[in-house]
Amino acid sequence: MGHLTIKHVRAFVLRGGGADYHDQADGHWIDDHISTPMSKYPEYRQSRRSFGINVLGTLVVEIEASDGTVGFAVTTGGEPAAYIVEKHLARFIEGARVTDIEKIWDQMYQSTLFYGRKGLVINTISGVDLALWDLLGKIRQEPVHQLLGGAVRDELQFYATGARPDLAQKMGFIGGKMPLHHGPSEGEEGLRKNLEALATMRERVGPDFWLMLDCWMSLDVNYATKLAVGAHEHGLKWIEEALSPDDYWGYAALRNNVPKGMLVTTGEHEATRWGFRMLLEMGCCDIIQPDVGWCGGLTELVKISALADAHNAMVVPHGSSVYSYHFVATRHNSPFAEFLMMAPKADEVVPMFHPQLLGEPVPVNGRMRLSVLDKPGFGVDLNPDCQLHRPYNR
Ligand SMILES: C[C@H](O)[C@H](O)CC(=O)C(=O)O
Ligand SMILES: [Mg+2]
């Protein structure tokens, strides 16, 4: 096995749902007047697609070993990411041993430093890294959670992100995270509406069910503080991604300002151990939320998680389906996971990356037995009905 090498890497693009989970049709809760950094422009307030949230599409990375085994992964990044894989990163992948994951990561990261470090380039590196782990698992016939050192629990538990925490509660989830609808540019009236929505949901779910607000980078420290103080009486468990990911100083201030007991969370748009080091050392948050498809992949997430552990911070990865489930199962400081409700009305559990993956497990009663992850690699297949396009075929 150690002598198996990588024969080919191929990068495809795909449209519609899946890893680019914001690429949804009209009427979906995930694109219904959600507060964003673009909400200050009234023409971009109603829909995130209006400012281009779905412009990239999905990147599919396929890696084939010398024995013909194929590993794959999906993430966001689309055509520009496919270009980076085929025109730049392929040289570090093809010809390497299938076990060279750490070395390939370092070469991809160091060679793209002059134009990379965060965002699209790290999404791309993440996609390659996840495909390498999938390949290794398939070659060894072992699930990725075993390659990572083994699970620390037999069952995962989930909170749900969506417009209907009340329905999520009935479906057995441990909590519900709602999108914030109104930002600072909608003034006091918007703030009142935000608090009313939370109060209504609290009435529906009773006192004990976790309720959280996802602010998607859209607030400033002053507004976020007012929101947190107003939300305290409605038992808000955490305020998520309130500020720009670049505003480490703002997060540190917000964490001091929020009422005692309320958690500050962030990190889904942060990348690499160096980005998370800033969040952790500056005391920005209580929970970090790296997305394994965006933060540098599994190889990097393991390092980020160790850093968080040493700072007594929890790691609750953002979305990312099987790619995060295999990780969460192996970490003591990841006691629960996120499930994004991708049904348009958030009224039923559907696979998060549908329609791109086949065999994608979903929580039942808000839980997932480890045994459903006991398949080689990440345990999923690419749906052959999806129209793959390879724009930079070499
Ligand atoms: C609901 C949020 O605005 C976003 O679409 C998803 C997210 O940030 C999360 O799941 O966390
Ligand atoms: Mg979020």
Image (cartoon, rainbow, N blue to C red):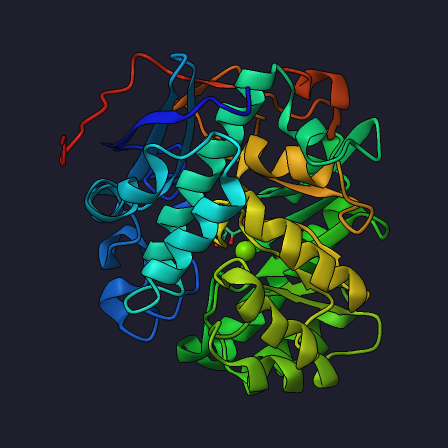
Instruction: Judge from the rendering whether residue 45 lies leftward or rightward of residue 343; answer left or right.
Output: left
Residue 193: x and y in percent read: 54, 66
| Residue at position x 32%, y 12% in the image | 384
Out of 48 and 42, give the one closest to the viewer.
48
Residue 301: x and y in percent read: 60, 51
Quarter-wise, where is residue 261 in the image? bottom right
Quadrant of the rendering where the C terminus is positioned:
top left
| Residue at position x 34%, y 56% in the image | 121
| Residue at position x 40%, y 63% in the image | 118
For residue 35, above or below residue 389: below
Out of 268 and 308, give the one closest to the viewer.
308
Instruction: Judge from the rendering whether residue 43 lies leftward or rightward of residue 350; answer left or right.
Output: left
Quarter-wise, where is residue 378 in the image? top right
Quadrant of the rendering where the N terminus is positioned:
top right
| Residue at position x 14%, y 30% in the image | 393
Instruction: Judge from the rendering whether residue 138 lies leftward or rightward of residue 307; answer left or right.
Output: left
Out of 135 and 102, give the one closest to the viewer.
102
Residue 90: x and y in percent read: 28, 40
For residue 248, above or below residue 96: below
Residue 351 shows up from this direction: no
